[in-house]
Amino acid sequence: MTEPIVTTNRLTKHYGERAAVDQVSLTVRRGEVYGFLGPNGAGKTTTLRMLVGLVRPTGGTAQVLGHPPGSPATLTRIGALIEGPGFYPYLSGRDNLRVLARYTGLDDVAVAAALELVDLTGRAGDKFRSYSLGMKQRLGVAAALLDEPDLLILDEPTNGLDPAGMADMRALIRYLADQGQTVLLSSHLLGEVEQICDRVGVISQGRLLAESTVAELRGQRSVLVRGDPLKVAAEVAAGQVGADRVTLADGMLRLAIEDDRTGAVVRALVTAGVEVREVHPGERTLEDVFFELTGDRKEVPS
């Protein structure tokens, strides 16, 4: 997974004075699941719309499958679901896909395969207007998969799905990646991105704050310590390992140290009169990283 399939260089989109996307430079590699992570309104959808040529950028450049966004050579190799899916409400799910298949010269075999992939075969004969939000979302993904695209772009693909449906969608995305397909998905769900993505781009207020693998973003291992009084425990731990390595996590101290330094820290805490109630290894989650990058990092008590 080294060949770039999507690249942007300082990609920017202004609406009036507001920068919806502000100089975003990212790289999506062939065969990976790339998670575009950020809160609602961060600029994810605008970026994806620029990549498929639906929105013209204010500044910067982009290349998708070796061509500028929106070029015919690119669009024939992309499957995309951006924002909500739109279908004829009076047609069945199967007939909606048949309409799209005719435009691309595909037959009913491709339609049946796409419906099977998203687990809609049993409801394929029902009218689209009778579908739940989650079923509509799955039909949108099926439409994006019809022509077996080289690049699949999904904007919040689990929106409207129940927990079982979300798990099925995650499994489908991983299956597609294992078959060599490249998936670029946006999400505001930290756990979702953490489970299925090979690499992550974190965006907030239109700016790309970080781009790396989940493991690299998590960074150094840590140790969690629960001690009472917490303020004293924090001061002692800071004296042992440095204040920059001590943060507060759900009423516990998170120490950015390796396991072999734990014993010395615990001894220092006990000597200082701290009642140590719990000690165990801890990893930074993607949630921890996200809040640190966006300026919401929790500090030790003062």
Image (tube, rainbow, N blue to C red):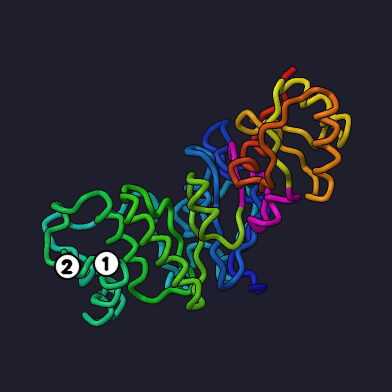
As for residue 47 lying within the magenta part, the answer is no
Is 2 displayed left or right of 163 in the figure?
right
From the top left corner, tell me how far across and down residue 188 is, in percent: 49, 44
The reply to whether discs 1 and 2 touch (Cβ–Cβ < 8 Å) is: yes
Which quadrant of the figure has residue 141?
bottom left
Query: Which residue is drawn at the image coordinates 88% and 29% (left, top)?
Result: 239
124 above or below 294?
below
Q: Which residues are magenta?
A: 201-221
From the top left corner, tell me how far across and down residue 110 is, in percent: 28, 79
Q: Callout 2, which amino acid?
A: Gly
- Residue 201 visible in the shown view: yes
As for residue 218 lying within the magenta part, the answer is yes
Residue to which mark 2 is pinned:
122
Residue to which mark 1 is pinned:
119
Q: Callout 1, which amino acid?
A: Asp
Where the C terminus falls, by quadrant? top right
Query: Which residue is drawn at the image coordinates 68% and 48% (left, top)?
Result: 210
From the top left corner, tell me how far across and down residue 197 is, in percent: 55, 60
